[in-house]
Amino acid sequence: MSIVRTGRTAVARAVIAVAAAAGLLAVPAATGHATPWPGGPDGPGRAVPWPDGFGPAPWSAEPAPSEPRASAPSGVKTVSSGWNIPWGVNWLPDGTALINERDSLKLYRVTRSGARSEVKAEPHIAAFGSGASLLGIAVSPNWSRDHHIFVYHGAKNDCRIARLTFDGSRISDYTPLVTGIKRGLHNGGRIKFGPDGYLYATTGDADEPRIAQDKKSLNGKILRMTKAGKPAPGNPFGTLVYSYGHRNPEGLTWDDRGRLWETEIGEATHDELNLVKPGRNYGWPTCEGPCSTAGMTAPAHHWHPSRGVPSGLVYTDGALYVAALRGQRLWRIPVHATGIGTPVAYYADTYGRLRDVVKVPGERALWVTTDKAGKNADKVLEVKLR
C-alpha cells in the first residue's frame, strides 16, 4: 500500500491532539496496572495474515488455549539513577551489566544492586570521531575466552560496527568491522548475538528512504555477520544483508522457537513489530504499517506513534516486551506458536520515554532504561515479573 509521506507535521500533531482531547487516543496512566489497547485500526482484535504464509494459521488476538498465559509485570523499583541517555544494556557472564550512554560515549559496569564504575578506554572512545554517538553494545558469547565486546556507533562521517577488547576494567584494541553505513537521524543501532552465534545489527535509512529498498546498500537493513564482520553463512544475498525495507529498526530479540522479532520506528502513521525472515522485504518506503503490496511483508502488529515509537525489545516468559519512546510505556505482547496475543501497556506516562529493555539473567525481572529525562535524570528501572 503506497502512502504519501509528509512527516510528522504540525497538522498531524494537531489531529492527534484533537483526538486525544476527545478521548480517542487516551490510555490511562498506571503504576503497575495494565491498560489494554482499545479497538480501532491499531487494535488487537483484528485478524492479521501470517507474513508471507509463514506458519499454518492466521495470527490470533489471544494466546493459544493449549499454552499458558505469559507472566506480567508486578512492580517497579529504581536500580540506578543519574544517567544521561543510557542507550544499550548487555550482560557479562558474572551477572554484571554493561551500560553505555549515547552522547557522553561513556561505558559503565553496573552490579545488580545498581553500583556502577566507569570502564576506562585505551585510547578513549574519541577514536570514534567528531560528533560521535554510542548506540548498541553486545558482549561476545565467548567473552570468557576472547574478552571481546562489540559496539554500534556513529562516527564523523558514517556509522560503524566495531570490536573492542575488555579486560574487566578497561577497553582497548578498537577494530572497525563494518564501516560506510550512512549516518543521519535514522541510524538503527541495535546489535545482538543470535542463538546461531552470529551478530545481528539494525541500520536505519539515514533519512534516504529509497536506499532501504537497495539490497546493495547497508542502510535500512538487518545485517547478519561473523565476529570478524564478514557475511554469515546462509545469508540470503551472499552479503551482510539479512532483511531489507526497514526505516529505523531499534529492537531485536528471539523467542523460544528461535524466531527473530524486530521493532521499527515509522514516519507519520505507524510503528511496527515485525517477524523477520531472511531475504524478506519489509516494505519501507512503499509501506508504513499495514502492507498488501506483492513481495512485501506486513508487520505482525503496528502502533500509532502516540502509543509507540518502539526501541528496545526482549522476549521472556512467553511474551515480548517493548520499550516505547514517545508512547512512554512498556508493552507486553504474548507470543504463541501461531501468532501473538493482545498487546497490553504498563506504566503509561509514568516514567517518561523508555529506551531499552533486557531480561535480568536468572531472575524473573527486566531492566528498563529511561531516555532524555534531563541532565543526570535518566534511570535504570527494574520491573519484577509475576
Image: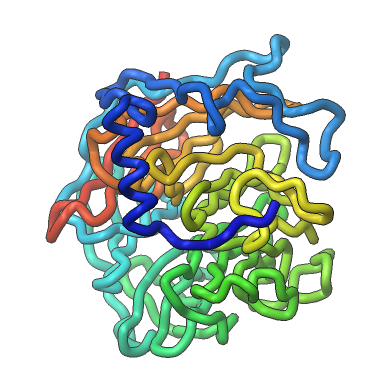
Q: Quadrant of the C terminus?
A: top left
Q: How many marks?
A: 0
Judging from the image, the colouring scheme is rainbow
Q: Is residue 223 visible?
A: yes
**Residue 67: where, in percent of width, then height?**
68, 15
**Residue 272: where, in percent of width, then height?**
56, 46
The residue that appears at 67% across and 56% down in the rendered structure is 2
The residue that appears at 38% across and 27% down in the rendered structure is 24
Q: Would you place residue 348 above or below residue 223 in this image?
A: above
Is 213 left, or right, of 180 in this rendering?
Answer: right
Is 42 left, or right, of 351 in this rendering?
Answer: right
Q: Would you place residue 81 above or below residue 139 in this image?
A: above
Q: Is residue 317 visible?
A: no
Viewer-closest of 93 and 53: 53
**Residue 338: where, in percent of width, then height?**
75, 27
**Residue 283: where, in percent of width, then height?**
69, 57
The residue that appears at 46% across and 34% down in the rendered structure is 362
Is 186 left, or right, of 28 in this rendering?
Answer: right
The residue that appears at 54% across and 35% down in the rendered structure is 320
